[in-house]
Image: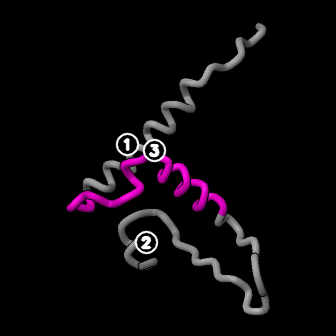
Amino acid sequence: MSTSLANTSSLALTIVKRPDDSAGFTVLPRRWCVERTLAWLIRRRHLVRDYERLPVTSEAMVMWSMTMLMGRRLARRRPPSSG
């Protein structure tokens, strides 16, 4: 998977594994970013279940959800700057 990813894009895939000697919960580096992004996507009701027949449709729904999220963040009210 990492070879095909490297061939098709400029992204690098890094697999982070838990230490062998750990028991219970262990904080893994950068995992919270992935978990947070997936939580944002699941908040969209349409993405809770995969109803689409084509992967392209699912990809479009994810892109639309992230576009809506970014649009809401950019449109937030900001206090006027004093200047």
Q: Is residue 48 above or below residue 7?
A: above
- CA distance for labels 1 and 3: 6 Å
* Residue 66 figure quarter: top left
Tell me, yes or no, whether the highlighted magenta stretch contains residue 40.
yes
Can you name the residue that lies furthest to the bottom here? 21
Q: Is residue 78 above or below residue 50?
A: above
Stretch in magenta:
32-55
Residue 23 lies, in percent from the top left, at 78, 86
Which residue is denoted by mark 3 in the rendering?
Answer: 66
Main SS of residues in magenta: helix
Q: Is residue 26 above or below residue 39?
A: below
Describe the element under mark 1 as helix, strand or loop: helix
- CA distance for labels 2 and 1: 26 Å
Sequence order check: which comes first, mark 2 or mark 1? Answer: 2
In the displayed structure image, the side of residue 78 where residue 4 appears, left or right: left
Label 3 neighbour load within 10 Å: few <14, some 14-19, many 20+: some
| Quadrant including the C terminus | top right
